[in-house]
């Protein structure tokens, strides 16, 4: 049995095991994190890049807009109170509607 076949069979057995068990929420979340860590270990940098850019583009766009509008700087300067959408929109001269959609 090759190494890749051995790993694939172990993963398939774990998947079947997970399907057959009644996991409580804590165990399910812990197993899900471990599964995501496994996927991250197995995927190539190119696959990861495609995942981030293509499938998570709304998140990336929101982050980019947050940087461009200075949202993160304003939040870090007011950690106790935070910053309202009105303050951010006024300081960045952006539409209050646009800023409100980023939250």
Image (cartoon, grey):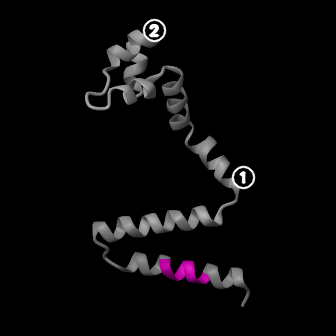
How would you rate the neighbour count of disc 2 (Cα within 10 Å): few for under 14, some for 14-19, many for 20 or more?
Answer: few
Q: Residue at x 55, y 42 (%)?
A: 56
Dominant SS of magenta comes to helix
**Foreground residue among 33 and 56:** 33
Question: Where does label 1 land, which residue?
Answer: 46
> What residue span does the magenta drawing correspond to?
9-14
CA distance separating discs 1 and 2: 37 Å
How would you rate the neighbour count of disc 1 (Cα within 10 Å): few for under 14, some for 14-19, many for 20 or more?
Answer: few
Q: Residue at x 32, y 74 (%)?
A: 23
Q: Residue at x 55, y 36 (%)?
A: 60
Residue 74 screen position, x and y as percent: 40, 23
Q: Earlier in the sequence, mark 1 or mark 2?
A: 1
Q: Is residue 39 magenta?
A: no
Question: Where does label 2 land, which residue?
Answer: 93
- Horizontal side of residue 38 vs 74, given as left or right: right
Looking at the image, can residue 48 be seen? yes
């Amino acid at each position: 049995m090759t190494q890749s076949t051995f790993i694939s069979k172990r993963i398939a057995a774990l998947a079947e095991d997970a399907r057959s068990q009644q996991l409580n929420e804590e165990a399910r979340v812990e197993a899900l994190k471990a599964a995501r860590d496994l996927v991250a270990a197995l995927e190539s940098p190119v696959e990861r890049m495609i995942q981030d850019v293509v499938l998570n583009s709304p998140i990336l766009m929101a982050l980019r807009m947050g940087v461009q509008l200075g949202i993160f700087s304003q939040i870090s300067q007011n950690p106790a109170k935070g910053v309202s959408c009105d303050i951010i929109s006024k300081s960045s001269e952006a539409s209050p509607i646009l800023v409100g959609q980023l939250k």
